[in-house]
Image (spheres, rainbow, N blue to C red):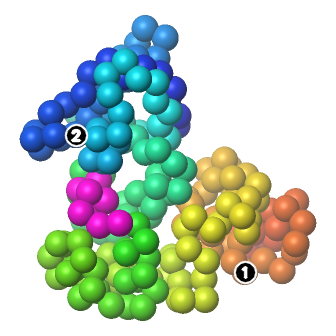
Amino acid sequence: MLAYLHGKINYKSNLLKKDNFLVVDVGGVGYKVFVPDVVLNRFSLSQEIELYVYTQVAETALDLYGFLSREELEFFELLLTISGIGPRSALDILKKAKIDDIIKAIQTGNYEVLSKVSGLGPKTAQKIVVGLKDKIGGVDQPLVGDWDSQFGDALEALIGLGYLPGQAREALSGCQATDAGEKIKEALKILGKK
């Protein structure tokens, strides 16, 4: 499964099309990667790009979704844990709403604000707030971007072992240890009980 791509942009879809994608040439192989609008706007043809990639394997397709940071990818994966939201819907949500706005709405439980800020329908906004409430946590929990500084290597190690980012975060938030190795051991014990 692909997790990361580094190459030159060979083709960009037109922003007016429904699907935003790039073709990234990596060593002579072109990978079609669906991306948020910001990526299409920021980069031009023949420019080098680095993308963190989510790979969707389905009966009829193998699709790649690319993001500029690991945090954006992790949040995209969190959205996929909500019933009824697939990769295309999650990418569309990230086109409409900023991650910080979604996190604030989840932390405060205020889906109306998310709906107004992002243009998402009230049902979708409510589904996101309710579906991610336990995975993001209340106001006292760190924001997604803060996890690297707080849990760093321990979070990466758990994700590397195959745990979803939300599962890893939840387990790490229950750890008492300060050393990364001890955090990993504690988190694995917590995850083993589930």
Instruction: Indicate the position of residue 8 as horizontal and vertical percent values.
Output: 42, 20
Of 149 and 193, which appears nearest the observer? 149
Q: Quadrant of residue 45?
A: top left
The amino acid type of the residue labelled 2 equals Asn
Residue at coordinates 27% horizontally, 47% vertically from top-left? Answer: 37
The amino acid type of the residue labelled 1 equals Gly
Residue at coordinates 53% horizontally, 56% vertically from top-left? Answer: 71
The residue labelled by disc 2 is 20
Tell me the distance, in whole angstroms, between the alpha carbons under discs 1 and 2: 39 Å
How many C-alpha atoms fall within 10 Å of the one at disc 2: few (<14), some, or many (≥20)? many
Q: Quadrant of residue 24?
A: top left
Instruction: Indicate the position of residue 173 as horizontal and vertical percent values.
Output: 69, 77
**Which region is colored magenta?**
90-98
- The answer to whether 149 appears left or right of 69 in the picture is right
Instruction: Indicate the position of residue 18 as horizontal and vertical percent values.
Output: 12, 43
Of 42 and 8, which appears nearest the observer? 42
Instruction: State which tag comes first along the sequence, 1 or 2.
Output: 2
- The answer to whether 152 appears left or right of 37 in the picture is right
Q: Quadrant of residue 167?
A: bottom right
Q: Can you say whether 144 is above or below 20 in the image?
A: below
**Is 91 part of what is drawn in magenta?**
yes
Q: Main secondary structure of the magenta part?
A: helix
